[in-house]
Image: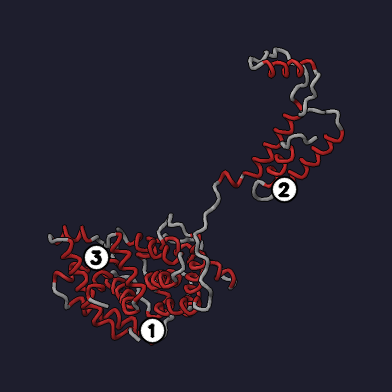
Amino acid sequence: MSEREVDQALVERAQSGDRRAFDLLVLKYQQRVGNLIGRYLRDSSEVLDVTQDAFLKAYRALPGFRGESAFYTWIYRIAINTVKNHMVAQGRRPPGDDVDAEVAEQLDVGGRLRETATPEHELLRDEIADNVQAALDHLPDELRTAIVLREFEGMSYEEIAAAMECPIGTVRSRIFRAREAIDKRLRPLITP
Amino acid sequence: MTEVSRQTLSALLDGECSGPEMHRAIDQLLGDEALRQCWERYHLIGHVIGRQPVAGEARAIAPRVRATLAPEAVLSMTPTRKPPRLAQFMPLTAAIAAGFMLVAVFLVPVGPREGFAPSTGTADSRAADDALIAGTVPDQRLRQNDSLLRARLEQLVVNHHERAAGPGLSGFVSYATVVGRPGQP
């Protein structure tokens, strides 16, 4: 079982007409796709427009998605094509050097998005980062280690269990408790 | 939204749910607005811990996509499949087959053939063969001197080529049906 399989299950729900499943995919990938498009465009409102457009194109193209590639790889290609077409339509020359989906995630691709963010958004971004970091710092060691190995190192539960010398069920529980503790600080900030 | 459902959501997020558990978790997630918000926040936490850039304004994307899609009718989401590669060439294949049929119609020799082996069948069939060899029975397939037949065949081929250019096998099928009809001149 992997994240890709979860994505594929959501895609299949969306293909069978459940729009909420597509909404979950947008919620999952909006940051990454927004950051990716932020590499090409300077204006943050333009980034939002083009990112939205990319997701709409993906939704309309969803019947043709057969799961031969990961959903993120597919939406990545759509996003790149959308932003390049947008730039051409605006009379701007798109850069010729594409970045692979995997590489793009490792780069500080949100830089341009940050440069033109509104003060409110900058404040929110800083508050999110500060609160998550503060919550992480206050976690008991075993919870912090489990969540960092998962989110920063990208390890599976099995690998974390081996590294921490505990059962997989314990890893699952520790990661959940870590998320709950961090979420407790995050929720008031971003819940409308 | 119970603690159990949030724990399952946490495992789902990491791709650590088994098949039936994954589908149950997705069902719960789709039907619970609080869990959906939790899904977004858990991902946001992952971005921050994973040192991926987080943009506050990017959170506006999902509501905007939702709002844009809301008035639209649900798309017909039956996954489309391309026709098999062979099927794409069917009109061409049909045209070639028709060409071979036409050549065969005109080139099969008439009357007694060299090296013709007598049939080993019944007395009736042997008599029929003898009659064919003697030329007393007209060959239904070949009337090369029949100008009406030639004109008709040429018209059929023209029709076939016109139809075969379109998708499917309609051209060839129509052609084969007419040509193959017994008793047709």
Task: Point out residue B113 in the picture as x, y percentages from the top left corner.
Answer: 74, 16
Say if A45 sits above or below B169 in the image.
below
* Three-letter amino acid code of the residue under disc 2: Arg
Q: Residues within 10 Å of mark 1 (few under 14, many from 20)?
A: some
Q: Quadrant of residue A113?
A: bottom left
The answer to whether marks 1 and 3 sit on the same chain is yes
Q: Quadrant of residue A108?
A: bottom left
Name the residue at 46% across, 57% down. Answer: A66
Q: State the CA–CA distance, disc 1 to disc 2.
A: 62 Å
Nearest to the observer: residue B119 or residue A116: B119
Say if A171 sits above or below A123 in the image.
above
Residue A96 visible from this viewpoint: yes
Residue A34 visible from this viewpoint: no
Tag 1 residue: A121
Q: State the CA–CA distance, disc 1 to disc 3.
A: 28 Å
Name the residue at 87% across, 33% down. Answer: B147
Task: Point out residue B20 in the picture as x, y percentages from the top left corner.
Answer: 30, 61
Tag 2 residue: B163
* Three-letter amino acid code of the residue under disc 3: Arg
Task: Point out residue A22 in the picture as x, y percentages from the top left corner.
Answer: 43, 70
Sequence-first tag of 1 and 3: 1
Tag 3 residue: A150
